[in-house]
Image (cartoon, rainbow, N blue to C red):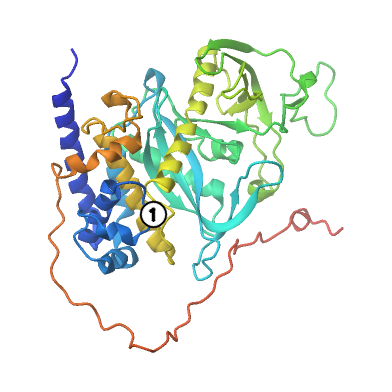
Amino acid sequence: MSVPVEAAAGAALDVLSRFRVEFYECLYARADALFELTDAILCKDGPVRTLVDLSLQAEHRRGHGALYQALNTGWVEPARLRALLASLPVPRAVEGRIVLAVDISNWLRPDAETSPDRLFCHVYGRGRSKDQFIPGWPYSFVAVLESGRTSWCRLLDAVRLGPADDAAAVTAAQLRDVIGRIVAAGHWRTGEPELLIVADAGYDLARLAFLLADLPVEVCGRLRSDRVLARDPAPHNAAPRPGRPRMHGTPFALARATTWGDPQIETRTATTRYGTAIATAWDRLHPRLTRRSAWIADQNAELPILHGLVVRLTVEHLPGGRDPDPVWLWSSRPGADARHVDQLWQAYLRRFDLEHTFRLLKQTLGWTTPKLREPASADVWTWLIIVAHTQLWLARQAVKDLRRPWERPLPANKLTPARVRRGFRNICAKAARPAAAPKPSRPGPGRPLGSSNRARAPRHTPGKTVKRAETLDQHYGRTG
């Protein structure tokens, strides 16, 4: 029996109100100003262009000075807010499986010489030799993906990478905490399918799977087309020979088809946009690890053999008439069947929903718009943006579609985040609003007129501040 639209909207509004009250309890300093600043982000007509423009919104009942003070001296309790985000309903993919996507998005600050903890962020450009490294603050996001063609996902966590952080280690710790909160909230129980983590080619998939081996997760991500993996060595029937046994067999080069051999699995799926999608899979392939970077810490430890499944995905055509290139995927769980192979590449394609979310955060909600100096202020603003996006996700069943004359009508369960935000102001007055009314106050005296600021802000050089203590030559005792 279908649920009436009014009942679904009322239930969604109740969940949204409870979330707003609990979010207000997560604000430990400047709570009223931060709460109303989040409402101003959601209720503004059009994209957020400037930070001070939000103080002119009717939902922000305080002055612009309170807005800046809230970001500079306010405090959002991260642990409590993370637990609140994990307690909300979690979308599930095929067969009730939870799919987590992890990716890094950069808040570029090239001219902020007085801002500390900046790193050189890799920015992709169009054409050859267009990639750049621009100073900024990289943030690692974790989100739950939905099934089907959509631009929605549920943001669960965000961590800013510092100059002394190892991206793989920070990501593994972040995922471990997120999975722990999901299990604690009762969204996953023993006996259910493993959680699937999808990542792009910028991650060290083997190390990520090694660091999360004790958790019920499967790591799947894209491989660069120039990677070379290895098979298991063939058994020797002759008498044993002296020396160390072989660890790697024949190579499997993604760029050389002569090294592939016959695949163990091949599936064909008809799609509406790409024609027939052909997925071929080879089982029990492992990357050849070397003692450098992450694997240099323990000289006496044996390098692990991490078996996995390699999937090659090809389609007939791409939108716009472009020639399709094959996509290579690696999964940390060998022994998959044809059904599981199709789930892997379909879940990876859903990872691009997180890219649409990044575009919404930056271009519509104004995540990278403020010119904040301190990284702590940037963290507070990032949490407000995540809360704003979560409120849009909760309100998509309660808002009415205020479409433009040139836009197509959409059902209530198919509204995009931007169209949900367009009608959020109409339900904001019906939802709970725990922020107190502003009190009159007098502005401070400020700096005397005509005097200059003598406290010059310190300058910071972007980049890594912690270098590796030993080189490869020192590690192995070589002197040249």
Location of residue 172 in the rendering, given as x and y in whole percent from the top left corner = 50, 43
Rendered residue at 30%/46% (across/down): 388
User: Where 26 falls versus 243 (above or below)?
Assistant: below
Residue 320 sits in which quadrant? top right
Quadrant of the frame with the N terminus: top left
- How many marks can you see? 1
Left or right of 170: which side holds 300?
right
Quadrant of the frame with the C terminus: bottom right
As rendered, which of 332 and 406 lies closer to the eye?
Answer: 406
Location of residue 282 in the rendering, given as x and y in whole percent from the top left corner = 65, 18
Mark yes or no: residue 298 visible. Answer: no
Location of residue 413 in the rendering, given as x and y in whole percent from the top left corner = 29, 25
10 Å neighbourhood of mark 1: few (<14), some, or many (≥20)? Answer: some
Rendered residue at 37%/40% (across/down): 155
Residue 421 sits in which quadrant? top left
Residue occupied by mark 1: 49
Rendered residue at 32%/31% (across/down): 90
User: Where 415 falls versus 262 (above or below)?
Assistant: below
User: Where 264 falls versus 102 (above or below)?
Assistant: above
User: Where 296 falls versus 457 (above or below)?
Assistant: above
Location of residue 397 in the rendering, given as x and y in whole percent from the top left corner = 23, 30
Q: Secondary structure at mark 1?
A: loop
Mark 1: amino acid? Arg
